[in-house]
Amino acid sequence: MAQVTRATFASSVASLLADNSAGDISAADMRSLMTDLEDSAKWYDEAPVSHNHAAGDTTSGTFADARIATSNVTQHQAALSVTESQISDLQAYLTSVSLDGVSDVTLTSAAHGDVLYRNASGWVNLGAGTNGQFLQTQGAGANPVWATGSGGISWSTAVDADIVPDADGTRDLGSSVNRFAEVHADAVFLGATQMTATTTKTAPTGDIVGTTDTQTLTNKTLTAPDMTDPTIAHRYNAQTGTAYTMVAADQSAVITMSNAAANTLTIPANASVAFPVGTKAEVWMLAAGTTTIAGATGVTLQGNGGSVSAGSCDIQTQYGGATLTKIATDTWMVGGDIDVVA
């Protein structure tokens, strides 16, 4: 015989044990029913029998933990979810877990001030930077770094500000010795210059010269300089031809004329080369050829008793020289080893 369902067993009982007056219930029919009952019943002294339920047999209820192995829960893993409320000790668990215990975090000599960041493969720590540095991103796909800021203003002495306004209602920025700005209620002054929305300052180019620096100044105009024992290197302009007209670069220059034949140095009109009044230049005759100093048209030459427009004079001897000084727009003085200007 075999296991049968409750419905099958009830149907067999109704068929084989039907009420009748003939007394035709056979012993074989009775044994068959009892054998089915024996095979289908769960007896108290028998171990549970494993059974696979069909899909949909169980729609609700609670199974004991030991009844279902973890390996058997595979069909709907993606649909399984656990909410915080279903884990009674979630907060305690998270509190107890340290970063050292997480598999993709590698802490190297962790110390106060370190920063945790994500590199290409996991979480790591960046050692603390130095005082004043800032954390700089290198963009996506790169690690952050500590960087040092540039620019701004550095002061060799402490900078302070008035807490209480002065009698004129202003506040000074900087010390009484090194004041660099004065703040009014409606304006800011840098020195004597009021800074407004339209005030601009052109940033200097090249090196900045300090008061104790050794620097070379090129193309700079010094207005009323107060210099003690200055060392000035004059421009040296060596000419070997028979004719030369001065250029702007010859201001304060030493010009040598060296040619065996007669040669001429011409001072140009102010309209051609605007030398500043007060310009000085030296002219020396190095060869046997006589050097003539001549004023261009409109230039008055004065020296050794003569004053002539477009005049000229000669240097008298080899290795002799003369000094040229501009005293007016188109007037030059000549002094030295020369003859009379004519």
Image (cartoon, rainbow, N blue to C red):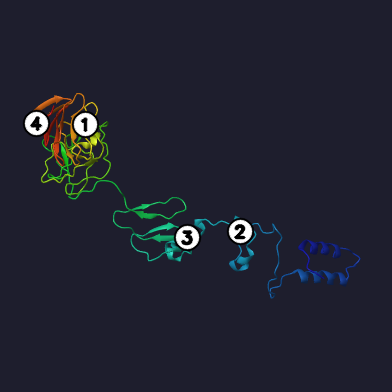
Q: Nearer the viewer, mark 3 or mark 4?
A: 4
Q: CA distance from mark 3 to mark 1?
A: 81 Å
Q: Position of residue 130 (x, y in %)?
A: 30, 58
Whether pointer 4 and pointer 2 mark residues with C-beta atoms closer than 8 Å, the reply is: no
Residue 36 sits in which quadrant?
A: bottom right
Q: Nearer the viewer, mark 4 or mark 2?
A: 4
Residue under numbered circle 2:
77
Q: Quick one: SS at disc 2?
A: helix
Mark 2: few, some, or many residues within 10 Å (few <14, many ≥20)?
Answer: few
Residue under numbered circle 3:
122
Horizontal side of 235 relative to 80 (left or right) equals left
Q: Amino acid at mark 3?
A: Gly
Residue under numbered circle 1:
266
Q: Work out which quarter of the rendered image holds the C terminus and state it.
A: top left
* Number of the label disc, if any, that sits on residue 304: 4
Q: Nearer the viewer, mark 3 or mark 2?
A: 3
Q: Position of residue 223 (x, y in %)?
A: 15, 36
Q: CA distance from mark 1 to mark 2?
A: 103 Å
Q: Quick one: SS at disc 3?
A: loop
Whether pointer 1 and pointer 4 mark residues with C-beta atoms closer than 8 Å, the reply is: no
